[in-house]
Image (tube, rainbow, N blue to C red):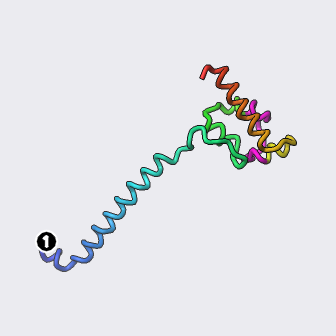
């Protein structure tokens, strides 16, 4: 064992450093991943998609579709800004409707 250590000192030291760095950055990545979940009740913004708002505000998909006045099987990723334009509303007015709809949904649910 002593001969191995003498011949491969730098290799073992480099391995130990790399292993230490992997653990250090791995723990940091795990902490970040744990906190990565969508922030609950994040203020609604024009860039958000209906799915994002639904998840962030904990509103079922069907209820969100009703609030947004959308039909099932609509387009894929569409932002609230695009939806507001299609409905002829300002983004602020549309977001106000969404917030009022979420409040009404929660009141009906007793939340």
* Tag 1 secondary structure: loop
> What residue is shown with label 1?
1
Most extreme residue toward the right is 88
Most extreme residue toward the bottom is 7
Q: Based on the displayed image, in which of its 4 quarters is residue 70 positioned?
A: top right
Residue 33 x %, y %: 47, 50
Q: Is residue 70 left or right of residue 3?
A: right
> Residue at left 65%, top 37%?
54
Q: Is residue 18 magenta?
A: no
> Residue at left 77%, top 38%?
73
* Quarter of the figure with the C terminus: top right
Q: Where 51 sits versus 66, above or below? A: below
Q: Which residues are magenta?
A: 65-81
Q: Nearer the viewer, residue 65 or 48?
A: 48
Q: Is residue 77 magenta?
A: yes
Q: Based on the displayed image, in which of its 4 quarters is residue 65 positioned?
A: top right
Query: Label 1: few (<14), some or many (≥20) within 10 Å?
Result: few
Secondary structure mostly taken by the magenta-highlighted segment of the chain: loop
Q: Nearer the viewer, residue 40 or 10?
A: 40
Q: Nearer the viewer, residue 107 or 86?
A: 107
Q: Based on the displayed image, in which of its 4 quarters is residue 75 positioned?
A: top right
Residue 98 x %, y %: 73, 35
């Amino acid at each position: 064992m002593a001969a191995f250590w003498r011949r491969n000192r730098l290799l073992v030291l480099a391995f130990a450093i790399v292993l230490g760095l992997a653990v250090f950055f791995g723990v940091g990545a795990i902490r970040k991943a744990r906190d990565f979940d969508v922030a609950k009740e994040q203020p609604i913004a024009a860039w958000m998609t209906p799915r994002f708002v639904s998840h962030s505000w904990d509103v079922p998909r069907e209820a969100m579709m009703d609030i947004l006045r959308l039909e099932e099987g609509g387009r894929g990723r569409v932002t609230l800004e695009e939806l507001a334009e299609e409905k002829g509303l300002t983004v602020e007015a549309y977001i106000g409707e969404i917030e009022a709809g979420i409040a009404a949904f929660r009141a009906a649910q007793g939340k």
